[in-house]
């Protein structure tokens, strides 16, 4: 199955990637060639095969619910683009 | 000193032939002089390295040195290093200085190793040629017109050019083994979970695995010893006991059962590469190994399965880059959506965007069963093939790549032809098995790698097998002819 330009623009929106006029045709072409590659799977029957999500079939390990971390807010925010009073700044969300 | 291995340098430090400070300064000078032609480093951490070297000399003087104390290393630029930029080869993280160390960096620091700098890589580890780096491509020291492989191309080129005796790498679909093969060095991808992923920038979390890139299997054993083992900071890190990897290096290979998967020796691979691999296998027969043909019938499906699952995981992992908490942020966003979209469009390169979009599509409503679930089922079939094969043999041997180092630009315009480069390496990541690449000769003066695949958590066997081969051959000691000795 093949994607057209509007499909690719919709996918870019879902992935929160801005895409300009010039880029759309190029991504449409390369995504279609990748889809042709991955569509090779459809020819193989997988009836009754249990999906493998993790090579060790591992499940999430749990630990006791105890505080183990120190507060490092200043150190962790030192690499943030914009902070004020210990808060991350973003454009206005609610009018 | 540039041609010495970690083990040899460690002995020289013990004998007092030179100090760690002298050694570190010599390597730093060499990098500054020669790396303009390879571009294998993104960041050189000179001041930090000299401090570590001085501390290492003090430890040695007071009898507190380990085998690795005072030895130089470089880290692939996706391992977080406190106070030293971690760019992941991306504009997105060009300004990112991590507030903490990756667990493996922390462990190598504690062992007294000296970090010379951070090596170049494909952006977010997505690539097989190191051409997708924001910091420009790396050149293969064997031929500057050719790629070093990827994504750990900077680490492989730096070790091959003798700019550093060892480096760390990461392998999601072949990113340690393929550049190791193309640059003629030794690379080990351990079992999934053997080494903590804490502080390693995530690409595809059920595949990503760190490992050592060295000149010899003996050196890889030294590094893995320190890097491996349970970590409370990574709940997916394996709890299996870590054996003494150096202790079994000299075990006899008499009776070793080697399996040769017929699908890896089929048409489509450079015949000279197959010849070199067969010559290597003949050496193992001389050492007492027996060889039998096996089958891994789903090999061809590993590429489509991987290029659904890894991008799906990537699209989720890379959603964290939103311009809010760290990394690149676009100028004057008009609202939150504009902030996300322009930050990500400006910060990511083309291949990263392609994989994010493929993953987003595969996970989107209505397509999940046809792509993601289907690929996970194929993943189990591929794993079952390996489990069956490894019940009959001790190790599997095969080529690492279908061709030797290709020219810069040769495959860059067509993502699918680049993906085919990983046909012999991807399936191990799908199954989570350990694999190694060691040099086994040349094709048209370019290095060829032999891949050794073992059972889960049997890295000791891989290192033993590789070390025994390196005792009777000298391919791992070859260095590029144009290499400056200075």
Image (cartoon, rainbow, N blue to C red):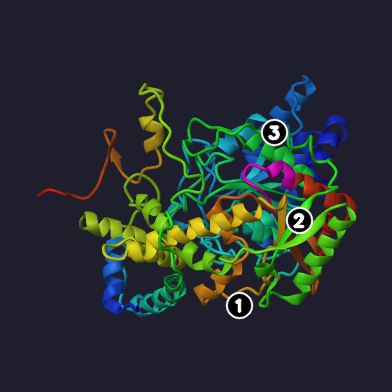
Same chain for marks 1 and 2?
yes
Q: Total marks drawn?
A: 3
Residue B352 image offset from top left, x and y in percent: 44, 63
Report the mark closest to the observer, 2 or 3. 2
Q: What residue do we see at 62% from left, 37% from top?
A: B228
Residue A39 image offset from top left, x and y in percent: 42, 73
Q: What residue do we see at 35% from left, 78% from top?
A: A1
Badge 2 marks a residue whose secondary structure is: strand
Badge 3 marks a residue whose secondary structure is: loop
Measure how far apart labels 3 and 1 are at the Cα level.
Answer: 43 Å
Range drawn in magenta: B453-462
Tell me whether circle 1 and circle 2 mark residues in contact (CB < 8 Å).
no
Find disc 2 in the rendering and name its residue.
B258
Same chain for marks 3 and 1?
yes
Find disc 1 in the rendering and name its residue.
B410
Q: What residue do we see at 77% from left, 25% from top?
A: B60
Looking at this view, name the residue that lies furthest to the left: A95
Badge 1 marks a residue whose secondary structure is: loop
Find disc 3 in the rendering and name its residue.
B243
Image mark 2: chain = B
Measure how far apart labels 1 and 2 are at the Cα level.
Answer: 35 Å
**Viewer-side residue, B29 vs B400:** B400
Looking at this view, name the residue that lies furthest to the top: B62
Image quarter where the C terminus of chain B lies is bottom right
- Compare marks 3 and 1 and give the one earlier in the sequence: 3
Q: Does the magenta segment cover residue B416? A: no
């Amino acid at each position: 199955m093949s994607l057209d330009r509007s499909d690719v623009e919709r996918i870019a929106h879902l992935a929160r990637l801005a895409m300009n006029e010039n880029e759309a045709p190029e991504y449409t072409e390369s995504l279609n060639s990748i889809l042709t590659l991955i569509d090779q799977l459809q020819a193989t029957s997988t009836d009754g095969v249990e999906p493998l999500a993790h090579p060790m079939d591992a499940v999430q390990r749990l630990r006791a619910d105890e505080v183990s971390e120190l507060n490092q807010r200043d150190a962790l925010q030192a690499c943030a683009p914009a902070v004020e009073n210990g808060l991350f700044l973003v454009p206005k969300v609610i009018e | 000193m540039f041609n010495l291995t970690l083990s040899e340098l460690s002995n020289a430090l013990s004998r007092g032939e030179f100090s760690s400070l002298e050694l570190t300064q010599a390597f730093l000078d060499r990098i500054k002089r020669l790396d303009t032609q390879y571009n294998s480093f993104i960041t050189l951490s000179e001041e930090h390295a000299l401090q570590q070297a001085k501390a290492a000399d003090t430890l040695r003087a007071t009898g507190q040195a380990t085998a690795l104390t005072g030895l130089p290393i470089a880290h692939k630029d996706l391992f977080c290093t406190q106070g030293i930029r971690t760019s992941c080869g991306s504009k997105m993280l060009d300004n990112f200085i991590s507030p903490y160390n990756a667990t493996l960096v922390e462990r190598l620091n504690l062992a007294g190793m000296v970090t010379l700098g951070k090596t170049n890589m494909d952006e977010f580890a997505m690539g097989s040629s190191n051409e997708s780096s924001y910091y420009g491509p790396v050149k293969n020291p064997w031929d500057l017109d050719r790629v070093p492989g990827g994504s750990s191309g900077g680490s492989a080129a730096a070790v091959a050019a003798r700019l550093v005796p060892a480096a760390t790498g990461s392998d999601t679909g072949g990113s340690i083994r393929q550049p190791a093969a193309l640059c003629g060095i030794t690379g080990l991808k351990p079992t999934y979970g053997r080494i903590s992923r804490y502080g390693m920038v995530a690409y595809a979390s059920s595949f990503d695995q760190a490992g050592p890139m060295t000149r010899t299997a003996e050196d890889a054993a030294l590094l893995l010893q320190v890097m491996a083992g349970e970590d409370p900071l990574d709940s997916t890190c394996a709890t299996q006991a870590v054996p003494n990897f150096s202790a079994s290096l000299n075990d006899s290979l008499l009776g070793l059962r080697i399996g040769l998967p017929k699908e890896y020796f089929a048409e489509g691979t450079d015949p000279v590469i197959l010849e070199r691999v067969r010559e290597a296998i003949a050496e193992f027969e001389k050492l007492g190994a027996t060889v039998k043909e096996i089958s891994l019938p789903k090999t061809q499906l590993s590429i489509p399965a991987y290029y659904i699952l890894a991008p799906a995981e990537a699209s989720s992992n890379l959603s964290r880059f939103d311009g809010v908490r760290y990394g690149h942020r676009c100028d004057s966003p008009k609202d939150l959506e504009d902030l996300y979209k322009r930050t990500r469009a400006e910060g990511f390169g083309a291949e990263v965007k392609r994989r994010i979009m493929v993953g987003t599509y595969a996970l989107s409503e209505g397509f999940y069963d046809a792509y993601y679930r289907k690929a996970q089922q194929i993943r189990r079939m591929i794993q079952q093939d390996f489990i069956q094969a490894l019940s009959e043999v001790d190790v599997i041997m095969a080529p690492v790549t279908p061709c030797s180092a290709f020219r810069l630009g040769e495959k860059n315009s067509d993502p699918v032809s680049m993906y085919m480069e990983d046909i012999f390496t991807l399936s191990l990541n799908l199954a989570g098995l350990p694999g190694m690449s060691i040099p086994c000769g040349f094709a048209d003066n370019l290095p060829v790698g032999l891949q050794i695949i073992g059972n889960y958590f049997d890295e000791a066997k891989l290192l033993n097998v590789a070390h025994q081969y390196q005792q009777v051959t000298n391919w791992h000691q070859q260095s590029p002819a144009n290499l400056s000795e200075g």
